[in-house]
Image: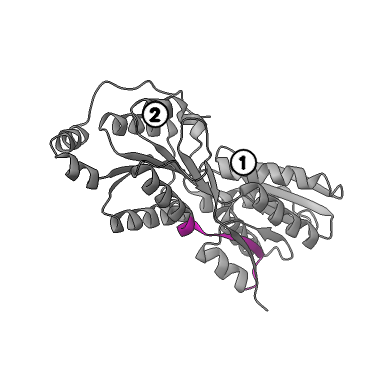
Amino acid sequence: MSKPLLSLSSFHRPALTFLTLALSSLPAHAAESARTIAILTPFQQSVATNLMIDSLQAQARGRGWKTTVFDTKGDVGQLASRMEDVISSRVSAIVIVSTDPNQLKNQIMAAKAASIPVFGLDSGYISGMAMNATSDNTAMGKTISTFLFKAMNGKGNLVVLTYRPHPGVLKRTLALDEVLKAYPGIRVVTEQQVEVPGPIENSRKQMENILLANPGKAAITAVWTGWDEPAIGVTQALEAAGRKGVLVTGIDGNSQALDLIQKGSSLKATLKQNFPQMATLVVQQLDRVFRGQAVTATELFAPAILTTRKP
């Protein structure tokens, strides 16, 4: 459960106060080139999130923009507080990464009132934001679910490991729920929420417990996971237990997951997202806004590719 939204604080941290004073002392033409972007996330430990942030920072540096990353290690309440701080420091723009903007409504509206545009990177979009760039999570959820259910021959027992508080993973999971309606022969044994940070270790432990509770050879046919790190943890648990024939899918296309797929493990498929392209979309829209232009669209999608074992 998320912590209550916080009101805009009246204090400044020393470093942020210094940034405010420094920018205010610059001449107009210098301030124009000294764009400052605050990047906020509760999930920088995630492989995909870190990749997006790295790409965003690299592209920003190429344009002469300065970036600062604030990672709250899963604490959304603290993320709201950090966002209030950067609003007070009068940054040029804010980018929230892998974050549900509904948990930052007050802060997003405060940023808008301060004429600071808020962009989403692999987040959702709500009124008050400039835009959000991500994959089409609903389409990905349908694609990977259909692949898995066909591989199950339309029947069997399914385990679901997901994280519905993440806006993208939520859309994938809702798509799973929808596709399931067309496969009455598939029964969901259990749906469990993965703990974040630490999704690989937590998913491995959860799967170990699920295997103990379902010891029969046919007790579990497949495991659907909301992204690759839980799929990796599940695969590790299946290998350690010697459980063969269980199908596993993920979404993201991170290197460890791709290696497991090519090795012929239980992990059979993932959807490889184009995280650098998502960052590019955000940078392009940041540039438009900095130039006084409107964003191209409030939601922009980078393509994802279904990836299975190469023959």
Above or below residue 300? Residue 24 is: above
Q: In this view, does 90 lie to the left or right of 266?
A: left
Above or below residue 311? Residue 250 is: above
Q: Residue 112 carries which label?
A: 2
The amino acid sitting under disc 2 is Lys
Residue depicted at 82% across the width and 44% down the height: 181
Quarter holding the C terminus is bottom right
Q: Which of marks 1 and 2 is in front?
A: 2
Q: Between 86 and 111, which is closer to the camera in this rendering?
A: 111
Residue depicted at 76% across the width and 43% down the height: 178
- Decide whether residue 265 is among the magenta residues: yes
Q: Where is residue 88 in the image (x, y as percent from the top left)?
A: 27, 29
Magenta part of the chain = 263-277
Residue annotated with mark 1: 170
Q: Can residue 193 be seen here?
A: no
Q: Between 108 and 226, which is closer to the camera in this rendering?
A: 108
Residue depicted at 23% across the width and 27% down the height: 12
Q: Can residue 229 be seen here?
A: yes
Q: Residue 286 carries which label?
A: none
Q: Is residue 165 left or right of residue 265?
A: left
Crowding at dot 1, Cα within 10 Å, few <14 / some 14-19 / many 20+, comes out as some
Q: Where is residue 292 in the image (x, y as percent from the top left)?
A: 36, 41
Real-space CA distance between mark 1 and mark 2, rounded to the nearest whole angstrom: 26 Å
Q: What element carries label 1?
A: helix
The amino acid sitting under disc 1 is Leu
Q: Between 231 and 258, which is closer to the camera in this rendering?
A: 258
Most distant residue in the bottom direction: 311
Q: Where is residue 146 in the image (x, y as percent from the top left)?
A: 75, 55
Q: What element carries label 2?
A: helix
Quarter of image, res 130: top left
